Image: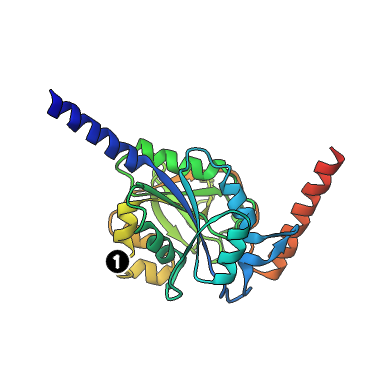
Amino acid sequence: MFFEAGKGLAELSMNQSMSKAAIIIPARWASTRMPGKPLHLLAGKPLVRHVWERCSRVPDVDRIIIATDDMRIAEAAFEFGAEVTLTSDKHPCGTDRIAEVAQKLSGFGIIVNVQGDEPFIDPKLPQKLIHVLREDKSLAMSTAACPMEAAELGNPNCVKVVTDLAGHALYFSRAGIPHDRDGDVRPGLLRHLGIYAYRRRFLLDFVKWKQTPLENAEKLEQLRALEHGAKIHVVKTRAAGPGVDTPEDAAAAEKILSKGKSSKKRA
């Protein structure tokens, strides 16, 4: 009986560990279009702080970590109270940076990648991505998509996704998918949002795999997961707030944030 009880406690502890979730926010200095972007001030706060504060409102998350390769970003994040991990500056993309941090989080089962340039991310969205992984053990990843206008179909910078009837990703593309040949089906068009939740063990395997043919063709790394047969659930959500990739995006975000502050003062 003692052995069985001990075994039960061990299994319970393992299950709890596998359901623990951490959000990691990659933030690098050397942005091509906007160097030093994480520290760009929006409404008096660094961009990365806006993202961190939004993530701090996500329920059921055990840790939030800013992953950066630059001491200037690390020092600024320490000042506003964030947990920070310094990473290599040799990573080819944010996913590799995330994986370096996840390697040290052995007590966690779910890792969420929230981009450091999304100051308007809805805190409910990471929660939903975590929830589907906790509910369906067959999933390797979850991500998100929002409704898209037909006019965006031809824009290669707008990544589209199609899913099966259960909401699992069939394909991601820069091309216009799905193609409504006769123009009378009107399928729901979905724009992919660059937020991911991974099972930690899958993430650590994923970054070791070589780039795959479809990934190379589309320049979309999530296709590597599909080409290896991984199951990705796509959470449908409303349109996301604007991300910040350029100085023009930053100016637009500043207007939105300033307008919000003015509304609060009047209230």
Drawn side of residue 186 relative to residue 110, left or right: right
Reply above or below: 208 against 124: below
Name the residue: 64% across, 51% down.
120
SS assignment at label 1: loop
The residue to which callout 1 is attached is 208
Residue 196 x %, y %: 45, 53
In the rendered image, residue 70, in percent from the top left (x then y), is placed at 53, 71
The 10 Å Cα crowd at callout 1, few under 14, some 14 to 19, many 20 or more, is few
Quadrant that contains the C terminus: top right
Can you tell which quarter of the image residue 253 is in? bottom right
Name the outermost residue toward the top.
Answer: 1
Q: Is residue 185 visible?
A: no
- The image quadrant where one finds the N terminus is top left
Q: Is residue 258 visible?
A: yes
Q: Residue at x 38, y 57 (%)?
A: 102
Residue drawn at x 38%, y 71% as measured from the top left: 216
Percent position (x, y) of residue 19? 36, 40
Name the side, left or right, on which 89 lies relative to 153: left
The amino acid type found where label 1 is placed reads: Lys
Q: Which of 220 and 206 lies nearest the eye of the viewer?
A: 206
Q: As drawn, is 246 to the left or to the right of 23?
A: right
